């Protein structure tokens, strides 16, 4: 089932001359885990916001083509309607705090109150989102007293509590240490396995390679490639797009080791290990 | 389109601007106190919000500002919310008619805001305090005029006005300086006439 | 981080009265003396407020709340006692200056009125958590958007104050003068508030985006995480207050 269909999407922010997105088309199936990569200003954040309707409804500007999410045409649907289907987590956790709630628990309730979720349903949803992101013990704290990493977990949990079908995450682990980001990735993967469609912008290529079903490579507002991590990261023109393949792929590339079945470089530590061992035997 | 500045339907950006503006009012007042300036400078945020988003948002900022002061510092502030609303409205209208173009016109707008503030505050001062403002300099003038048998409304008006004039002029100048320094991609969010263009 | 609030969590009976009843009490405290005129009603309401403040164990906290107004009131008594337009009868002399009976009576009326209002508000402010007050108002029909704005202000001010302290220290350590002549201090003002102001305005964009994502503009009937407290005693309080106001009007009409 097609969850997201984007056709010929073009977008230009107000007061700017260049297109932030230029003729982007793709389709995403329900339950897929999609990684979006590309250098700064490639259009990654703009694309994320286009899935939620912030582009064009919030910014205005110039818009062309179409985005269809779960059968809804985004250009003709209000953001608050889309918020029932799509959750979006931004990069900066500080500005994502609603700023009107005194505790983390209440902060998670903010979106649910706005949606009109009945009280009895609210609490289990909040509690399971807090458990998933490992922030149960901060429930009574003031959101602004949290560290950057804790705040980022709270921001993700706040969106997850709203139980969207699709979650879009724009560099959600920028404030987290390596162990913290691994935990967050595993939490997101768990949601993906339950059938949530995940779209994630991330600079940590190892993680993208390991968790994504497919990887979308953007550059200058155009869609360069949209394929399995192995195929995308085995391209020999990655440097041209400001991307370095995951470290394991680069090592194997340096050694000339490919996975025999596909002829592509291995992406993860485990795959790389297997191939290196095979190669030595 | 012509009356769009009076639209009562507030965008999310406009609503988020209000707490920031009230915070700016508070910070202005705090710094003025810290630097021992003989001014209040407690309406910079209201004036900024009025410049950015028009008279309706300016007025709401003024009202909410005084509600919050009333709840957290001095209950008497509630009543002077009317004055704050007047300042927000007048600056918002002038700004959206394009009357604030430089420091010179900022001074004029400050003067108009001072007149508005005086006209609204004076009856409150008379009804509430017998005509005083609580500002030492203004009240000295009030006492002098009362001693020389000027009518209460006149002494009270002078009391309020001489305090308001320098304060409101300084407030509008500071707010205008900040407004000019804001990036355009931010100020455009509060425009009432943006439309999505078709590509 | 402490939110901006004068709330004292003493958990007394007064604290459990719902915020709307306290608002109604303020209305009554202002309304009844206005209708009945004269000193007695004002003094009676003031006495009642003080008694309730004692019951709520917050009487001492009233002092800072009314401090500024007290200073003004003292100056009102002096200025009106000396210069009130209707002054005829000297009441007493202090160091060669004459205080007049009419002016003192006039200023005493102002004092009772102001203190009465202040104490009624103090009862609300000192015994009600601001977030509870805002939530009650939203339940009563205040737009949730305004509810958001009010609670957000209570959070944003302590945050900005925190930032401001950091900036003051930074600017001072860079050698900016914050003391000296009026010109020096005036010049220090803009560099001090500029960064905080810019920062808070620029972050409004990202915060608006984040609110949109959390369905802030939704027209769905809003629900609440906290349960509404409904009790018969609160209803009784409201009825008594309304009845008292009605009785005051009736008394005025009859007599």
Image: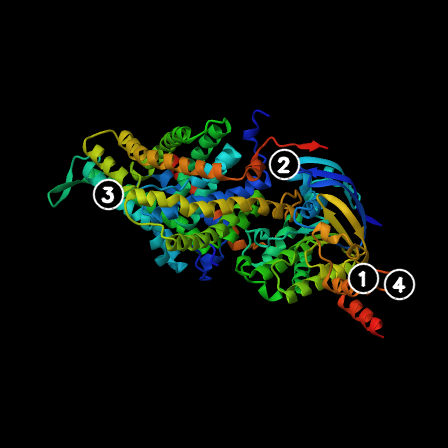
Label 3's element? helix
| Distance (Cα) linking label 1 and label 3 | 89 Å
Q: Quadrant of residue C186?
A: top left
The percent position of residue C175, horizontal first and vertical second, equals 36, 52
Q: Quadrant of residue B134?
A: top left
Circle 2 packing at 10 Å, graded few (<14), some (14-19), many (20+), is few
Q: Which residue is mark 4?
A: A261
Q: Tell me the mark number nearer the camera, choosing from 3 and 2.
A: 2
| Distance (Cα) linking label 3 and label 2 | 63 Å
Q: Tell me the mark number nearer the camera, choosing from 3 and 4.
A: 4
Left or right, B188 with reference to A241? left
Circle 3 packing at 10 Å, graded few (<14), some (14-19), many (20+), is many
* Labelled disc at residue A16: 2
Mark earlier in primary sequence (4, 2): 2
Q: Which residue is mark 1?
A: A265
Left or right, C113 with reference to A100? left
The percent position of residue B27, horizontal first and vertical second, equals 42, 47
């Amino acid at each position: 089932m097609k969850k997201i269909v984007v056709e010929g999407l073009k977008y230009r922010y107000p007061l700017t001359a260049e297109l932030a997105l230029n003729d982007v088309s793709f389709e995403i199936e329900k339950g897929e885990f999609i990684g979006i990569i590309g250098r700064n200003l490639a259009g990654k954040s703009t694309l994320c916001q286009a899935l939620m309707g912030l582009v064009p409804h919030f910014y205005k500007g110039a818009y062309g083509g179409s985005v269809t999410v779960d059968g809804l045409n985004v250009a003709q649907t209000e953001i608050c309607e889309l918020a029932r289907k799509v959750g979006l987590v931004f990069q900066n956790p500080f500005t994502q705090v609603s700023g009107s709630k005194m505790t983390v628990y209440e902060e998670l309730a903010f979106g649910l109150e706005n949606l009109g979720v009945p009280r009895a349903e609210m609490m289990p949803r909040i509690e399971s989102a807090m458990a998933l992101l490992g922030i149960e013990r901060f429930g009574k704290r003031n959101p602004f007293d949290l560290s950057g990493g804790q705040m980022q977990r709270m921001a993700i949990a706040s969106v997850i509590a709203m139980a969207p079908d699709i979650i879009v995450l724009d560099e959600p682990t920028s404030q987290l240490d390596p162990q913290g980001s691994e935990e967050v990735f595993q939490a997101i993967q768990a949601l993906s396995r339950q059938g949530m469609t995940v779209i994630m912008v991330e600079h940590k290529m190892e993680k993208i390679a390991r968790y994504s079903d497919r990887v979308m490579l953007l550059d200058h507002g155009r869609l360069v490639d949209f394929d399995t991590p192995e195929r995308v990261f085995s391209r020999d023109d990655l440097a041209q797009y400001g991307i370095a393949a995951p470290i394991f792929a680069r090592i194997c590339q340096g050694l000339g080791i490919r996975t025999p079945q596909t002829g592509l470089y291995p992406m993860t530590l485990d795959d790389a290990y297997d191939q290196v061992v095979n190669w030595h035997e | 389109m012509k009356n769009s500045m009076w639209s009562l339907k507030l965008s999310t950006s406009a609503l988020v601007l209000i707490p920031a503006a009230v915070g700016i009012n508070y910070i202005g007042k705090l710094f003025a106190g810290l630097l021992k300036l003989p001014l209040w400078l407690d309406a910079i945020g209201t004036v900024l919000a009025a410049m950015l988003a028009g008279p309706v948002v300016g007025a709401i900022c003024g009202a909410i500002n005084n509600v919050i002061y009333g709840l957290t510092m001095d209950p008497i502030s509630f009543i002077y919310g009317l004055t704050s609303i007047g300042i927000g409205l007048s600056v918002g209208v002038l700004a959206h008619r394009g009357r604030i173009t430089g420091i010179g016109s900022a001074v004029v707008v400050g003067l108009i805001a001072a007149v508005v503030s005086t006209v609204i505050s004076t009856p409150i001062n008379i009804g509430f305090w017998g005509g005083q403002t609580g500002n030492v300099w203004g009240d000295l003038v009030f006492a002098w005029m009362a001693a020389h048998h000027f009518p209460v409304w006149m002494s009270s008006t002078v009391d309020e006005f001489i305090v308001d004039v320098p304060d409101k002029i300084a407030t509008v100048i500071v707010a205008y300086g900040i407004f000019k320094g804001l990036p355009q991609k931010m100020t455009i969010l509060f425009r009432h006439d943006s439309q999505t263009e078709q590509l | 981080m402490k939110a901006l609030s004068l709330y004292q969590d003493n958990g007394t009976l007064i604290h459990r009265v719902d915020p709307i009843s306290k608002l109604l009490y303020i209305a009554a405290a202002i309304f009844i003396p206005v209708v009945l005129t004269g000193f007695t009603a004002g003094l009676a309401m003031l006495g009642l407020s003080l008694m309730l403040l004692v019951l709520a164990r917050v009487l001492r906290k009233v002092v800072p709340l009314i401090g500024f107004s007290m200073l003004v009131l003292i100056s009102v008594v002096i200025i009106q006692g000396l210069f009130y337009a209707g002054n005829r009868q000297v009441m007493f002399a202090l160091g060669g200056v004459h205080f007049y009976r009419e002016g003192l009576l006039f200023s005493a009326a102002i004092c009772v009125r102001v203190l009465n209002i202040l104490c009624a508000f103090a009862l609300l402010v000192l015994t009600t958590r601001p977030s509870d007050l805002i939530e009650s108002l939203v339940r009563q029909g205040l737009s949730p958007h305004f509810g958001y704005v009010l609670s957000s202000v209570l959070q944003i001010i302590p945050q900005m104050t925190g930032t401001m302290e950091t900036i003051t220290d930074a600017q001072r350590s860079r050698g900016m003068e914050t003391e000296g002549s009026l010109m020096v201090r005036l010049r220090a003002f803009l560099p001090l508030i500029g960064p905080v102001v810019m920062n808070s305005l620029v972050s409004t964009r990202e915060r608006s985006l984040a609110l949109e994502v959390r369905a802030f503009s939704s027209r769905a009937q809003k629900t609440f995480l906290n349960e509404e407290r409904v009790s018969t005693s609160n209803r009784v309080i409201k009825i008594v207050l309304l009845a008292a106001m009605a009785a005051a009007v009736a008394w005025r009409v009859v007599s």
